[in-house]
Image (cartoon, rainbow, N blue to C red):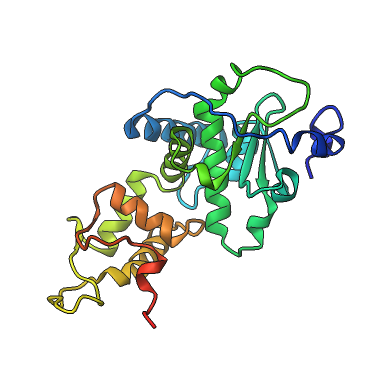
Amino acid sequence: MIEPILKGGYNQRLSRWSNLIKEPKMNVPWLSKQTISKRAKELIDGFQAMAGYEVKPPIPVEDIIERYLGLRLLYDDLTRVFRQEILGAVYVEARTICINERLFESGSEGRLVFTCGHETGHWVLHRQYANEQPKDKTNKPSIVCNPKNAKEPIEWQADYFSSCLLMPEKDIREAFEEVCAPEPLVVKNSMRDKNNAGEQPYLEQWPFIAAAMCEAGGFSNVSKHAMIIRLQDLGLLVNKTGKKMDWNSILVDE
């Protein structure tokens, strides 16, 4: 629970400002993927220098948040607090990151850890812009993350930061060479295509590729879906089927 660390009686104010959360648009500058990746690497390098050991996957994002950035990392039922689906929130003045504890219920460590990385991205990339927002006395969070806003620039940047943080490019490429080959893996066929050429891998085999990558590279706190997106982003996996690599792609038609 986050009551002990926020000033002004946090729980007493929930009913007052949960209705005030309108998710105001925060204007953030455009950032290239290269810039975001560099900021994520700098964070890992900084933590590594402080910790005194080489940091390899699984990246200890919670330790980075608490030990290196010096933030409070807390878990609360943010769905109840905000009366809508909120995955995480950043309180800049209170130096606090709060994650929706309901993510534990999903049984997916990957989604929980990715959300921690996402909120860390907001702290690293966006806290200065949060400080420019109008101040009030309600202790409202500076940044609130609703899945419906995933395509907004501020949310995309935090997502990409989390991907770079949890799956550093160097480690991904090393694991990919071990699992597959130095060259990109091209997926041309789906098992559902009547006229497929029989050339593997098939689109529906992406979870096995992702699982092999997670095992080979030590990415034990990364979901298969996040891994397959990262492989495609780095150009290591090329999907030429015209269909998405997601869980719907492997569902069997009735």
Name the spot of residue 214 as percent of width and height, x first. Answer: 41, 61
Place residue 194 in its image quadrant.
bottom left
Question: How many callouts does the rendering have?
Answer: 0
Q: Is residue 244 visible?
A: yes
Is there any visible trace of residue 173 in the rendered image? no
The x, y position of residue 97, in whole percent, is 65, 37
Residue 251 x %, y %: 39, 75
Picture quadrant where residue 245 is located: bottom left
Q: Is residue 134 above or below residue 1?
A: above
Would residue 170 appear left or right of 24 to someone viewing this image? left
Tell me the residue at 49%/28% (across/down). Answer: 125
Left or right relative to 241: residue 115: right
Name the side, left or right, on which 196 lies relative to 214.
Answer: left
User: Which of 12/95 is in front?
Assistant: 12
Q: Is residue 192 above or below residue 84?
A: below
Query: Split into 4 quadrants, where in the image is the C terminus?
Result: bottom left
Q: Residue furthest bottom?
A: 254
Rendering quarter of residue 90: top right
Image coordinates for residue 248, horizontal then vertical, percent: 40, 68
Q: Residue at x 68, y 35 (%)?
A: 21
- Residue 173 position (above or below residue 65): below
Q: Residue at x 84, y 39 (%)?
A: 11
Which quadrant of the figure contains the N terminus? top right
Q: In the rendered view, tell whether residue 244 sits above or below residue 47.
A: below
Residue found 61% across the figure and 19% down from its top: 133
Front-most of residues 251 and 113: 251
150 horizontally vs 24: left or right: left
